[in-house]
Amino acid sequence: MIVHYNLHNLGQINNPIITIGSFDGVHIGHKKILKKLTDTAQKEKGESILFSFYPHPRQVIFPDNKSLKFLNTQQEKIELLKTTQIDHLIFFPFTIEFSKISSKEFIRKFLVEKMHIKKIIVGYDYHFGKNREGNYENLSQLGILYGFKVEKIKALNVNKIAVSSTKIRKALSEGNIKLANAFLGYEYSITGTVIKGNRIGRKLGFPTANIEVNDNCKLIPANGVYIAHVNVNKKLYNGMVNIGIRPTLNLKEITIEVNIFDFDADIYNQQITISLVDRIRDEVKFHDLDALKIQLVKDKAEILKKIDQI
């Protein structure tokens, strides 16, 4: 997969078959579209292209909206897309000026005249262009006008629910990690740098790695205690993660800390990745540290039991 950050040096692409979108999460619905994309490109002796935007359009149009969160960082998305066998990934620079062009102008100027597309494959709820005015019907009409084909992929359902990035974000915000993972097709992960904390966990017999997430737009799931797989220097461990404000310590800032099982090494300033498997309970305020320690012993026992069943 070749990653492009503009169209300047794109070069000649043979019979381009394209899909367009953010693909936040690269979930199982996205993979259905991308599988159709690569299969079609192979069948028609062409090259497959995912045309995306960076920064995300909403970050540019609503720069003061600090509540905007995403399932993937840009690098996480790239790594996930590498597994899909697409030929080209384009991150087109999104600007205020670009946001003002119509859907028709976008298709004509960038996809037809610049890239000479032959076919566009889109999802069931696809919209594009200024104010999201473009949809499948508009795209089909433009296809007739400019000489390219359009194909729409039906929604992929899990338990009769159409999979979407919005539904995954909602599930994570509610702490429903198992549903989110089912929609994603993989365990939701968070990567960050290990920083020094207050070392209370170590005093309780549960030393934790405190993780500082490097991207402010990365969605952090609901507060609570989670089962996790932990990747440290490309080696996997089991662990217990707490996301929250640590109310027993009367703190207010949300932190992410993981107790890595069967692990005792100095990893300050290193990057680690936690992949969340299940959520076992809410975050609770205990009346003292002894009560917290008793609960942590119970949490670890429950996690070890569940890990054996996974």
Image: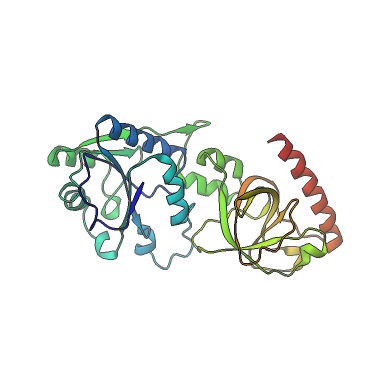
In the depicted view, which residue is nearer to us: 266 or 173? 266
Residue 30 seen from this side? no
The structure's colour scheme is rainbow
Q: Say which residue appears at 57% left-offset and 44% top-offset.
A: 187
Please indicate whether residue 104 sits to the left or right of residue 225 in the image.
Answer: left
Q: Quadrant of residue 138?
A: top left
Q: Is residue 83 above or below residue 240?
A: above
Q: Is residue 180 visible?
A: yes
Image spot of residue 204 (x, y percent):
82, 61
Residue 66 coordinates in the image, percent (x, y): 47, 65
Q: Quadrant of residue 178?
A: top right
Residue at horizontal 38 percent and vertical 58 percent from the top: 56
x, y percentage for residue 114? 18, 51
Q: Residue at x 34, y 63 (%)?
A: 61
> Between residues 146 and 38, which one lies in front from this camera angle?
38
Q: Please say if 301 is above or below 286.
A: above
On screen, residue 147 above or below 206:
above
Give left or right: position of 62 versus 101: right
Q: Residue at x 14, y 38 (%)?
A: 147
Q: Quadrant of the C terminus?
A: top right
240 on left or right of 115: right
Instruction: Examine the image and state in which quarter residue 213 appears.
Output: bottom right
What percent of the width, then of the height, locates residue 286? 80, 60
The one of 44 and 225 positioned closer to us in this rendering: 44
